[in-house]
Amino acid sequence: MTDALPVDRLLRMFLEQAREHAVMLVDRDGQIRWSNPAANRIFGRDVAGQALAVLFTPEDVAMGMPAYEISTATAHGVAEDDRWLVRNDGSRFWASGLMIAVRDEQGELLAFGKILRNRTDLWEQM
């Protein structure tokens, strides 16, 4: 019976079993601290311990998009975007996602939650 399971255990199971949605925790310095198995599958590597910038195209890194995403989420609570991201093998995919600022009860910024989905299928239909 799921009502007897602690919420943190259910949440962990949910995140580990998600197949299509990459979920990551990113620290204030832009380092990925944790990623679910779907993120690792989508990007073709364990992204935990990597800089957020490794997910972005070189063009977006040059334009400062990883820092912009962090600053937007910091200022507004969330940063939504649709953009090309890069797998470990260098191939690109169209992702739709968001970054959410995670704050404590006093409003202090602790980290960011990043959720995205490979939506190359939608891009190809355009």
Image (cartoon, rainbow, N blue to C red):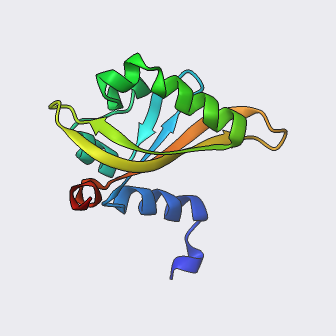
Viewer-closest of 87 and 57: 57
Q: Is residue 5 above or below residue 106?
A: below
Viewer-closest of 72 and 126: 126
Toward the bottom, the furthest residue is 1
**Residue sitting at x 71%, y 34%:** 75
> Looking at the rendering, which quadrant does residue 61 occupy?
top left
Residue 41 is left or right of residue 96, and the answer is left
Q: Give x and y (percent) for residue 98.
A: 51, 47
Q: Give x and y (percent) for residue 57.
A: 31, 28
Residue 119 is left or right of residue 32, and the answer is left
| Residue 31 in sight in this render | no
Toward the right, the furthest residue is 106
Q: Give x and y (percent) for residue 82.
A: 41, 46
**Residue sitting at x 53%, y 23%:** 67
**Residue sitting at x 52%, y 78%:** 2
Q: Give x and y (percent) for residue 103.
A: 72, 40
Toward the top, the furthest residue is 62
| Residue 86 in sight in this render | yes
Q: Is residue 29 above or below residue 92?
A: above
Q: How many marks?
A: 0
**Residue sitting at x 23%, y 36%:** 87
> Looking at the rendering, which quadrant does residue 15 occupy?
bottom left
Viewer-closest of 8 and 61: 61
Where's the C terminus, which quadrant? bottom left
